[in-house]
Image: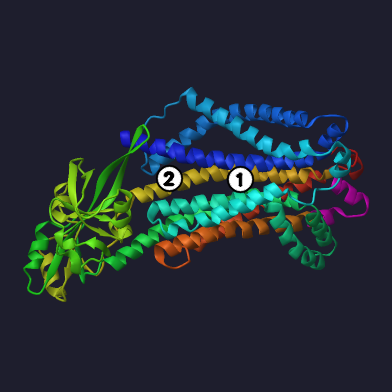
Amino acid sequence: MSQTKSILAILAGSFGGYAVLVAIFVVASTLALTVEQRRREFALLRAVGATPRQIRKLIGVETTVVSVVAGVIGSLLGIAVSHGLRGAFAAIGVVPADFALSISPIPLVVALLIGIGAARLAAWSASRRPSSINPVEALGEAAVQRKDLGRIRLTIGWVVMAIGLGATTLPLFIRGQLGAAMSVMAALVLIIGLTLVGPRVVGGAVRLIAPALSRFSGVSGYLASANVLKNSRRLAAAVTPLMLAIGFAVVNYYSQTTLTAAVQQETARSITADHVITGVVGVPAEISSAVREIPGVSATSLVRTQVITASETGDSVEVQRRPANGLDATAGGMVDLDVASGTLADLTAGTVALSEAHASWEDKKVGDTVDFWFADGQPARLRVVATYRHDLAFGDYVLSSADARAHTSAGMDSAVLVNSAAAAALRDLTSRYPGLTVTERVAAQDQGDQRTQFLLNLVAVGVILGYVAISVSNTLVMSTAARRREFALLRLVGTGRRQVVRMMRAEALLTVGLAAVLGSLVAVVPLSLLAIGLTGVPLPAGPIWVYLGVVAGASLLGVVSIAVSTRMSLRAKPIDTIGLRE
């Protein structure tokens, strides 16, 4: 029960951090679009004497009211979502099936305050531009989009992107689950930086694409080209949430599949034995001794187990289960741990070998002692006799087979590794024990905790992407609906309804195309470097159809949102719509 609470506490912290970051990110983008659409109203207020402080206060108060109402409704809906998450966590083994869901008002209040704070922060960012324009320039500037981004925003954006690119190199030096997590964080930093410089990047891309769009798509293509050239900020606001959805989903999924593939690859490379004896539920301990009695045969026991470690983080203690292995001191010719210091020949009862990365983190070297708990909860204080580099295949701890076996419930080996060409003799021996087989390779250690973490990430990412999907639809619908007067004017000067629909279809395809390219770019850099660090090749592991499905789903969401809002905006008569207030 305490471990379950610890997992949920860690999950709440990491998931909450991601959720708040994405919320600020999406809300800021939506508010910026809303403020841009109301620039004529703010320009008029500035022209008749409103002060910058009053404009900022107006936007802040409106945002606060909306965020309070939305926060109350969202907190109540969050209770229903929490029941669904509890069921999902129980299904993947994170919590017991009978784990009760406790509803307290404190998380609801905290969520409400965080939501209001995120909205106010986004409002402050969005209100700086309309509150700072000169009253004399206000009305003239209101009719045309400002062409250039501010130098401060551009500088911050390029710096953030540089930090993100630097962070993508961390998996070259940090392996395992932490390296995969660093890839996800690097992708988020890249997305934030790209959002800040988005209008500049999108504007450059549009200048390359627009001439071809107008040349090959007739009148509708010409109109779409003119629109995106003159309103790159509006296009960037539509591209941003789609880019976030694609990049975030792709990096989260393929970082985990690449890590799993790296574990399997390193295991296959590290087990150098000629034959492996395995059993349905394990291998009796006497088998390894019986195998060694066969002339010309050497063997070692392999015991898959776990160790329990505890580390203090502030006022709390973090308890973790880590995969570990038990080997005999004679395992040198059958496994390759890529030993960095010491020797496995000294691996006897009461000793342990540590991965080089974990030994460095714990500031341990050969001859030091290390404290932890065996899989059955018994405390251990063992002397370090070696450090090694193949931690993906063997975990951070390698014990003597005797110690590992003594602290497992079955008291059996997981496998026996054999160096011998006498396969027939081995099969004759194993035939006396039902369930034992002789194979050529050993499977990677059961990564139950990593699999659970993978499924946990998918559930969390699914919730966040659901929120992003709603935000994408809202942003695209709002952006398109605000152009009703533009559509009406086009129709009044002779543009047909179908031409307007085709124009918006071309803009929608351009929007989802740019989002797919930029979202893929912010994912491919951290994933390629993660793959190089883990597997030595720049291609992430995993099925390509997941990437294609993510891009197709985001593209379909974007195209449908724009198409539906366009057709709704064209329902009214142009002469009635042209008189509406912007």
Q: What residue do we see at 31% from left, 33% from top?
A: 2
Q: Name the secondary structure under disc 1.
A: helix
The answer to whether residue 407 of the structure is visible from this angle is yes
Q: Position of residue 449 (x, y in %)?
A: 34, 48
**Foreground pick, 518 / 260:** 518
The answer to whether residue 559 of the structure is visible from this angle is no
**Foreground pick, 489 / 266:** 266
Q: What residue do we see at 49% from left, 63% from top?
A: 528
Q: Is residue 211 magenta?
A: no
Q: What predominant SS class does the magenta segment belong to?
A: helix
Considering every residue shown, the one lying at the far top of the view is: 105
Q: Position of residue 258 (x, y in %)?
A: 43, 59
Considering every residue shown, the one lying at the far bottom of the view is: 421
Residue 469: assigned label: 1
Q: Position of residue 19 (x, y in %)?
A: 53, 40
Neighbor class of circle 2 (other Cα within 10 Å; few <14, some 14-19, many 20+) is some
Say what amino acid the circle numbered 2 marks.
Leu
Residue 237: assigned label: none
| Above or below for 73 versus 304 | above
The mark tally for this picture is 2
Badge 2 or badge 1: first in the primary sequence:
2
Say what amino acid the circle numbered 1 marks.
Ala
Q: Is residue 582 left or right of residue 555?
A: right
- Which region of the structure is painted magenta? 485-502
* Residue corresponding to mark 2: 456
Q: CA distance from mark 2 to mark 1?
A: 20 Å
Q: What residue do we see at 51% from left, 35% from top?
A: 81
Q: Is residue 528 left or right of residue 274?
A: right
Q: Quadrant of the N terminus?
A: top left
